[in-house]
Amino acid sequence: MEGGYITKEGEVYHIGLRFLNHGEYARSRKKAYSLAKNTVSDISNETDEEVEFVVENDNRGILVYELFHPDSQFPSKEGHMSGSPSSAGIYYYLHCVATGKAILADYSDDRVNEVLDKWGLPEQTEQTITERDELFEELDRIRSNGIAFADEEYVDGLREVGRSVKGPDGKVLGAIAIIGPKYRFTDERFYRGLPEILDKHVDILEEQIHETYLDDYR
């Protein structure tokens, strides 16, 4: 169709490839997002695990970058939802993934309630938090130690360790998570080893974002 936004195959209409250009522009227009892409790669190389960078959009999380280590044998959690070779653009409910909980923990309680009023607390697995009081208790724990955990809360058998990424103004830009199967994410690695790696890389990322911000306004 004219403009390239819609294409017709037989009697069926599909989204056109013109949207690809707009999506890539949206993903790359902020320097912080490009820096986060490099951090995703660095963490994946160090851990040999899936790593994601997610930002909040429309009170949900949208996957901006995702990387699998070449040796990883565990399929993406989105394999349960999509046959697409790339999961970029997939939306998550914030309450059931580590990136989402890390983002929510940086919001005020009023802001969190706005999110929950719109989307609720849908149950993804038997481990998903589905009560507001329980979620707020979880967010208080994340605020205390800076790390978010999701233990089989989105997909059975999958564990996630996440941390928010903040800009120079202290506001959350998004979050990064390391994701993998429970049999590889033993308690020692899940609660100690991976959070240390995540902290190290996100600290560096936030320093880079701060320097980029200063360069832009010198």
Image (cartoon, rainbow, N blue to C red):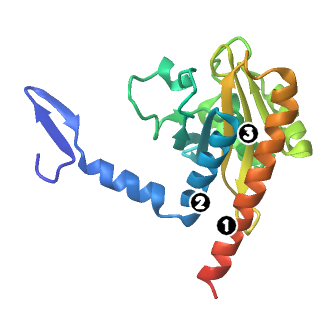
Residue under label 2: 35
Crowding near the residue tagged with mark 1, few <14, some 14–19, many ≥20 C-alpha atoms within 10 Å: many
| Among the two numbered marks 1 and 3 on one chain, the one whose residue lies closer to the N terminus | 3
Q: Earlier in the sequence, mark 2 or mark 1?
A: 2
Q: Is residue 73 above or below residue 215?
A: above
Residue 162 is labelled as 3
> Going by the picture, which residue comes out furthest to the right?
144
- Residue 138 as seen in the image, left or right of residue 68: right
Amino acid type shown at disc 3:
Gly
* Residue type for callout 1: Ile
- Name the residue rendered at 42%, 35% in the picture: 86
Tell whether 78 sits left or right of 14. Answer: right
Based on the displayed image, in which of its 4 quarters is residue 3 positioned? Answer: bottom left
Secondary structure beneath disc 2?
helix
Q: Residue type at mark 2: give it.
A: Leu
The Cα atoms of the two marked residues, 1 and 3, are separated by 18 Å
Q: Quadrant of the N terminus?
A: top left
Residue at the (56%, 23%) spot, across then down: 77
Residue 187 visible from this viewpoint: yes
- Depth check: give the residue in front, 177 or 171: 177
Q: Which residue has dot 1 on it?
A: 209
The C terminus sits in image quarter: bottom right
Up the image or down, 84 lies above or below 24; here it is above
Q: CA distance from mark 2 to mark 1?
A: 7 Å
Q: Of marks 3 and 2, which one's residue comes earlier in the chain?
A: 2
Q: Estimate the x, y position of residue 174 in percent, counting from the top left.
A: 65, 50
Most distant residue in the top direction:
126
Q: Secondary structure at mark 3?
A: strand
Q: Which mark is residue 42?
A: none
Q: Residue at x 54, y 59 (%)?
A: 34
- Determine whether label 2 and label 1 are within 8 Å by CB: yes
Residue 147 visible, this orientation: no
